[in-house]
Image (cartoon, rainbow, N blue to C red):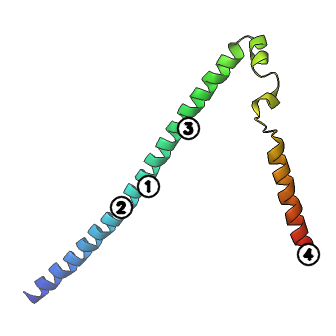
Amino acid sequence: MSAFGWIIVALAAIIGGYIIDYQKNKLKWQDKSSKTAEDLDEIRTLVHQMKKRIENLEAIAASDPEEFKSKASDPLDRIKMDRDEQIKNENQQKVSNLAKEKGD
């Protein structure tokens, strides 16, 4: 009976080792599949964004060139510049004060 007990213990250890290895591999596969699913979702959103951009470019290409030129005649028109003299004077005063402090 003692020899039979040792055989059962050895078999239990071997089978337990296989079960533990299987569970470790299963966790690795799940981790890889979850990363793959995240990558797939990221690629889907990227493709969706690219489709929108292509549609916009097609709309621009299909539109009348004169209409497009009139909308963007001067890119500087889109920049808002504040030409208030008071703000300019304040900035010049700050710069001169900083220059005086650095000179001292």
Circle 2 — which element? helix
- Which label sits in the foreground, 3 or 4? 4
Residue type at mark 4: give it.
Answer: Asp
Crowding at label 1, few (<14), some or many (≥20) Cα neighbours within 10 Å?
Answer: few
98 over 75 or under it: above or below: below
Pointers 2 and 4 in contact (C-beta within 8 Å):
no
- The residue pinned by badge 3 equals 46
- In the rendering, at what x and y percent does residue 51 appear? 57, 28
Alpha-carbon neighbours of circle 4 within 10 Å: few (<14), some, or many (≥20)?
Answer: few
Element assignment for label 3: helix
Nearest to N terminus: mark 2 or mark 4: 2
User: Residue at left 78%, top 11%?
Assistant: 66
On the picture, is 101 further left or further right than 10? right
Q: Amino acid at mark 2?
A: Leu
> Where is residue 43 shown, x and y percent of the image?
53, 40
Marks 3/4: CA–CA distance: 56 Å
**Sequence-first disc among 1 and 3:** 1
Q: Which residue in the structure is indicated by mark 1?
A: 32
User: In the displayed structure, does residue 57 sit left or right of residue 9?
Assistant: right
| Quarter of the figure with the C terminus | bottom right
